[in-house]
Every structure is written in structure tokens, then in C-alpha cells.
Image (tube, rainbow, N blue to C red):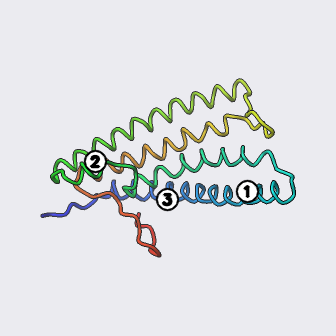
Amino acid sequence: MKVAKPGPALEALGRVVGVLSAVAMGVAAFCLLASFALIGWAVVMRYVFNAAPVWVDEVVGFALVAIVMLAAAQTLRRGEHIGVDLLTARLSDAASRWARIWAAIAVGIVAGVLIINGWGTASLAKMLGLVTEGSLEWPTWWLMLLMPIGGSLLLLAAIEAAWRAAIGLPPLAAPAHGEKDAQ
């Protein structure tokens, strides 16, 4: 069986998507670590010093949105999104390829909804001057911008995934422990 090779355009797209999604994943990882640290600190403050910081829950909630939106593209690139392996594992190579293309198209549609609705919602929130409820009262459009940003990254990853499937390439594999990520 002949193994397909990516052309220069797909390789360039892969490099761009790889860099952007790696940066986004780094930010998501930082948000996750910061959330762990803040939660630990808040628990100590609450139960040892009886002085619970009220803003920690808000920051961790915002960080969770960032984690999900920013990590989705890299997860898709590595073929680690939730799938029904029980069914797709039984498909022929051609049917599996079509299933991956359709899955990438579906992800692209969802990404488009995130981009369009997220941008519109963030724009409206900024225009109205909406702020979050609670002790922090941050502008909500900051948080809402994560939807079009994450959606844009996800759309690029979906285009790459569909292209790879269309020419017969497998999804990028997650690097083994200790290895560098292959773009």
C-alpha cells in the first residue's frame, strides 16, 4: 500500500497550526497549573486561617473556559477528541477515511459557530459594558473572546485534519512521553 505524503501547502498549514495550537496549549496548561495553585491556596486559607478568598472561584471558572477553548485544537490535531472507536475501528480503510473527513467537517461547522457567535456576543458585551457578576467584575467580553479565538484555532485544526484524511494521512499521533511534538 502506497503511503501518501503531505505536499508543501499541507506542511506549511501543519507548521502554522502546530505553532499556534502549541502556544494555545501552553497557555491552557499554565491556566490549569494556576487553577490548581489557587484552589490549593484557597483551601488552606479557608480551613486553616478561616479567611476564604471569594475571587478564587471566579478566576478558576474563567481559567476553565480558557483551558477548554485553547486546548481543543491541539487535542484534535493529535486525534484525541472523543470518538466512537467501537464503530470506527470496524470500518474499512476507505470508510474510516470518509468518517474522519466528515468528523473534521462537523468540527469545522462547530468552530464556525464558535467564531461567529463568540465574536458577536463579545462585541455586544463590550458595546454594552457588561461585567461579570461577583467580586471581580471583569469585562465579560474578555472571557467571550475565548470562543472566537478557540474556534479559529479549532477551525484551522479541522481543515488540517480533513486535508490529511482526504489524502490518506493518519491524524498526528500524540508524542510518546519525553518526545518532542511532531508538527
Report the Cα–Cα distance between label 2 and label 3: 23 Å
Q: Which secondary structure, mark 2?
A: helix
Q: Which secondary structure, mark 1?
A: helix
Instruction: Name which of mark 2 and mark 3 comes first in the sequence.
Output: 3
Q: Position of residue 50 (x, y in %)?
A: 86, 53
Q: Position of residue 75 (x, y in %)?
A: 44, 54
Instruction: Name which of mark 1 and mark 3 comes first in the sequence.
Output: 3
Q: Quadrant of residue 122?
A: top right
Q: Which residue is mark 2?
A: 100
Q: Quadrant of the C terminus?
A: bottom left
Q: Quadrant of residue 61?
A: top right
Q: Which residue is mark 3?
A: 19
Q: Residue at x 44, y 67 (%)?
A: 181
Q: Which residue is mark 1?
A: 38
Q: Residue at x 60, y 28 (%)?
A: 121
Report the Cα–Cα distance between label 1 and label 2: 39 Å
How many C-alpha atoms fall within 10 Å of the one at disc 1: few (<14), some, or many (≥20)? some
Q: Residue at x 35, y 59 (%)?
A: 11
